[in-house]
Image: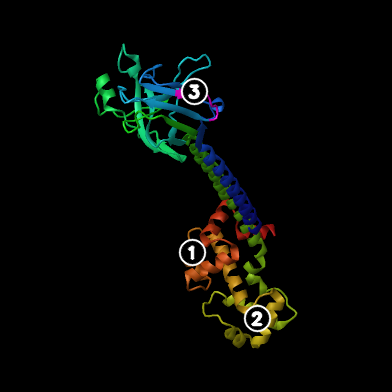
Amino acid sequence: MYEFYKKALIACLCLLVASLLLSYFCLAQSYLHLPMLPMQDSPLPWRPVPGWNVRPGGPVALHIQDDPQRLRYEFDIAKSADPPFVAVDLAFRDRKGKPVQVDLSRYSALSLRVKCAPANTLSFSVFTFQRVVKGREYLNDRPSSAYFSCNKSESRVEIDLTRLETPHWWFLMVNLDLSRQAYKLDKVSKIAIGSTFQSPLGTPSAVEVSELELEGRDYRYLTALAVMLCLAWGGFGLWFFLRHTRVLTEDVRGRLQKDLPFVAYQQLSLEPHRDREKTAILQFIGSKYADPGLELDTVVEQTGVNRTKVGELLKAELGYTFSGYVNKLRLTEAARLLAEKESAAVAEIAYSVGYGNVSYFNKLFKEEYGCTPKAFRDACKRGGATVEEGMEQG
């Protein structure tokens, strides 16, 4: 059994290490990061374009700098502008420049590093396609917005894409109930960064975005991890149970075979011994081992052999102390009874071999045979092991 437990422990540790490595890999893969800058390296096809109200020579001026590493633009909103608003659209386009819709449903947040001069409060908007009107197609792009502040010192901003607010005017324009606040990110046409009513008017302003990254979770990796761990540990558990049963059965057979001299304790009195004292001691213990009150003093009194000689003879003859030899006889007889008398209760067997305390009997039995009396009996049933069969084979 020791070798089996050793192999099982090694297998368990190997499986544990593999599980930890697999968990680390799947957990890392489940965190999604999609950088949109630099623009030429982004997996998403987008380009910065001026918002709808920017006109050459108009009250709203916007200049987008040609910088592939960053998103940089300057704007100036005249005090006479109506509306006093400007935005840069990060419009999704295919290779031919045709507008497309991208699926961002796997992403729950967007982070950016931004600085403004002068200090400003800007809006961030996601436009999701939702067919609600005919004739005015631009209204089918539902804007959902959040707001953030920035200044001359670069700062990191994180926007929760799942908690954006749709402005009331859009519900009014499309004649939609205000309670329909839910939106999906599976058809996004553009992202916009724009000014707000708190943005400075009549003052040249600049915005620089050096980092723009979508973040999310892909729970398919965690689901796959859970399935693989369940299969792996379930398989290990099944292997351990089946293999343990087989090894335990073989171990029980081996122990029964090994203990045959003790099982046949009645024969000890019939075997010739050159030493009369040895014969007397073995005969007496072999006939009285089931007596709970059997003590070394009783053996000394009945055989006439002094205590020291009894201990020396048992140690030399069988390699046991007195209490060890008595326990060996009792446990071996208990094993025989467990294997042959299926209807007898464990407590009944314990009492019959000289133990008045069942818990103590269970403890000694497990130390001797590596399993509980009940498990020993089950192993005997599975293996068909009986003492009589073992003696015949021997």
Q: Earlier in the sequence, mark 2 or mark 1?
A: 2
Instruction: Give the Cα distance between marks 3 and 2.
Output: 98 Å
For the view shown, which residue lies furthest in the right direction?
274
Q: Indicate the quadrant where residue 296 lies.
A: bottom right
Q: The magenta stretch spans which residues?
A: 63-69
- The residue indicated by pointer 3 is 46
* Dot in front, 2 or 1: 1
| Residue visible at 51% across and 42% down in the picture | 230
Q: Position of residue 255 (x, y in %)?
A: 64, 61
**Image position of 349 with respect to 177: above or below:** below
How would you rate the neighbour count of disc 3 (Cα within 10 Å): few for under 14, some for 14-19, many for 20 or more?
many
Label 1's element? helix
Residue type pointed to by label 2? Ile
Q: Is residue 189 visible to us here?
A: no
In this picture the colour scheme is rainbow
Quadrant holding the N terminus:
bottom right
Local SS, label 3? strand
Judged by depth in the image, the label closer to the viewer, 1 or 3, is 3
Name the amino acid, label 1: Val
370 lies above or below 11: below
Residue 281, disc: 2
Labelled disc at residue 346: 1
Instruction: Point out the image quarter for the C terminus.
Output: bottom right
Q: Give SS at disc 2.
A: helix
Q: CA distance from mark 2 to mark 1?
A: 29 Å
Label 1, label 3: how many angstroms apart (C-alpha)? Answer: 78 Å
